[in-house]
């Protein structure tokens, strides 16, 4: 076919550049949903797969960091990306984000990710921490416009007053939700004075609505939080991986408030009962102490009386002994004390005839002249 003079002739590289400019203008971003096929990872970094339907197949290219979790062929995915014609490898869609789509695929993706993270120990009970009870300040990650937020605030306020709330308003479903909630957790953990606990809530919904809470990025962020976490997603039948990774799980947002703080009315009744019981116990202890004191008083009185009697007997005995040893008592029995000068005489050896001695009797004394001595 001959080239017409009015035809624009492009080189190959120019054509690729013009086409990419046209695609960028007309389809800067596209969202394509289809069945996953030919999933492969190259060099631990590059991600390749196809999405297909009954008629067509489209190639996709990205990095492993864009994976929402483990995937397998046959899953239904919703992929956001930018169409591009590569100068060597042909047409593909550069991946921006990947979301499992359809209840079956979402559940299967969660099962694969749960198995992976279980092996890593992210859900082990041993690593879970108790929540402060009740906390004085919490970080709340949710949508401020949601019914879950309204229910949580209502129940929390009715049960307990004075809890300070740091709200981080985020999307709780959709493509942007995981990234926003991960950023919220990071923000609360990075505060100079972080809250006592971080609470993440949303109401029920379809598997696709709740899929964000089973994403790998959010599940890891919950597990890595240095602040204890409480997660309540959906209704009791719903169970997300973020809940499994949290330190505490609640069945509903209202139940989260119930687990977080006590019921003020119940606490007041309990305090009154405790005060009454304390008074009763105090009175009983006073009575017991008083009885023991009286008993000890009697015992001490008896012991004191025994000590006094024993002392009296001892004094009497000693007095009798002193009386027996008193020289005056000896003199009264007819004995005398003979002194020569200041020396009491016990022998006649030192006496000579003509010596003068003093003689003391029981009644009175006299002086005598020694005329004769004998042994």
Image: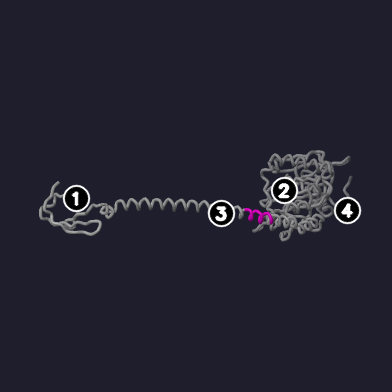
Q: Earlier in the sequence, mark 3 or mark 4?
A: 4
- Residue 250, visible in the rendered structure: yes
Q: Quadrant of residue 279?
A: bottom right
Evaluate if marks 1 and 4 touch, with contact meaning CB atoms under 8 Å apart: no
Q: Where is residue 334 drawn, in percent x and y?
A: 24, 52
Q: CA distance from mark 1 to mark 3?
A: 62 Å
Give the secondary structure at mark 2: strand
Way the structure is coloured: one colour
Q: In the rendered view, does 90 fall on the left or right side of 375? A: right
Residue position for label 1: 346
Q: Quadrant of residue 168?
A: bottom right
- Disc sitting over residue 248 in the figure: 2
Which one is in front in this view, the residue at disc 3 or the one at disc 2?
Answer: 3
Q: Main secondary structure of the magenta part?
A: helix
Q: CA distance from mark 1 to mark 4?
A: 169 Å
Q: What residue do we see at 58% from left, 55% from top?
A: 290
Q: Earlier in the sequence, mark 1 or mark 4?
A: 4
Which one is in front in this view, the residue at disc 3 or the one at disc 4?
Answer: 3
Evaluate if marks 3 and 2 touch, with contact meaning CB atoms under 8 Å apart: no
Q: Where is residue 187 drawn, in percent x and y?
A: 69, 56
Q: Earlier in the sequence, mark 1 or mark 3?
A: 3
Q: In the rendered view, does 132 fall on the left or right side of 52? A: left
Q: Where is residue 77 drawn, in percent x and y?
A: 82, 44
**In terms of depth relative to the viewer, which is nearer, 373 or 175?**
373
**In terms of depth relative to the viewer, which is nearer, 30 or 189?**
189
Residue position for label 4: 6
Q: Earlier in the sequence, mark 1 or mark 2?
A: 2
Residue position for label 3: 294
Q: CA distance from mark 3 to mark 4?
A: 125 Å
Q: CA distance from mark 1 to mark 2?
A: 105 Å
The stretch in magenta equals 276-284
Q: Earlier in the sequence, mark 4 or mark 2?
A: 4
């Amino acid at each position: 076919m001959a080239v017409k003079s009015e035809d624009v002739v492009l080189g190959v590289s120019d054509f690729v550049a013009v086409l990419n400019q046209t695609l960028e203008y007309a389809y800067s971003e596209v969202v394509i949903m289809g069945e996953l096929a030919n999933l492969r990872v190259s060099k631990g970094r590059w991600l390749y797969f196809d999405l297909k339907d009954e008629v067509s197949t489209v190639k996709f290219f990205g990095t492993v960091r864009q994976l929402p979790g483990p995937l397998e062929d046959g899953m239904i995915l919703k992929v956001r990306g930018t169409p591009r014609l590569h100068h060597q490898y042909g047409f593909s869609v550069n991946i921006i984000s990947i979301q499992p789509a359809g209840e079956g695929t979402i559940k299967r993706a969660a099962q694969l990710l749960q198995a992976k993270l279980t092996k890593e120990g992210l859900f082990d009970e041993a690593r879970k921490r108790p929540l402060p009870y009740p906390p004085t300040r919490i970080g709340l990650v949710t949508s401020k416009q949601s019914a879950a937020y309204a229910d949580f605030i209502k129940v929390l306020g009715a049960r307990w007053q004075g809890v300070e709330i740091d709200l981080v308003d985020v999307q709780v479903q959709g493509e942007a939700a995981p990234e926003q909630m991960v950023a919220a957790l990071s923000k609360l953990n990075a505060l100079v004075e972080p809250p006592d606990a971080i609470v993440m809530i949303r109401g029920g919904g379809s598997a696709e609505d709740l899929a964000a809470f089973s994403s790998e990025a959010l599940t890891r962020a919950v597990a890595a939080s240095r602040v204890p976490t409480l997660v309540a997603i959906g209704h009791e039948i719903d169970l997300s991986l973020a809940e499994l990774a949290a330190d505490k799980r609640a069945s509903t947002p209202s139940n989260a408030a119930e687990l977080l703080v006590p019921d003020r009315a119940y606490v007041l009744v309990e305090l009154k009962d405790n005060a009454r019981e304390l008074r009763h116990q105090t009175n009983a202890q006073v009575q017991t102490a008083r009885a023991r004191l009286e008993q000890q008083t009697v015992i001490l009185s008896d012991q004191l009386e025994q000590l006094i009697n024993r002392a009296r007997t001892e004094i009497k005995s000693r007095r009798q002994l002193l009386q027996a040893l008193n020289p005056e008592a000896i003199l009264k029995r007819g004995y005398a004390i003979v002194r020569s000068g200041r020396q009491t005489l016990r022998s006649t050896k030192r006496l000579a005839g003509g010596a003068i001695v003093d003689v003391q009797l029981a009644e009175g004394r006299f002086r005598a002249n020694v005329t004769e001595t004998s042994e």
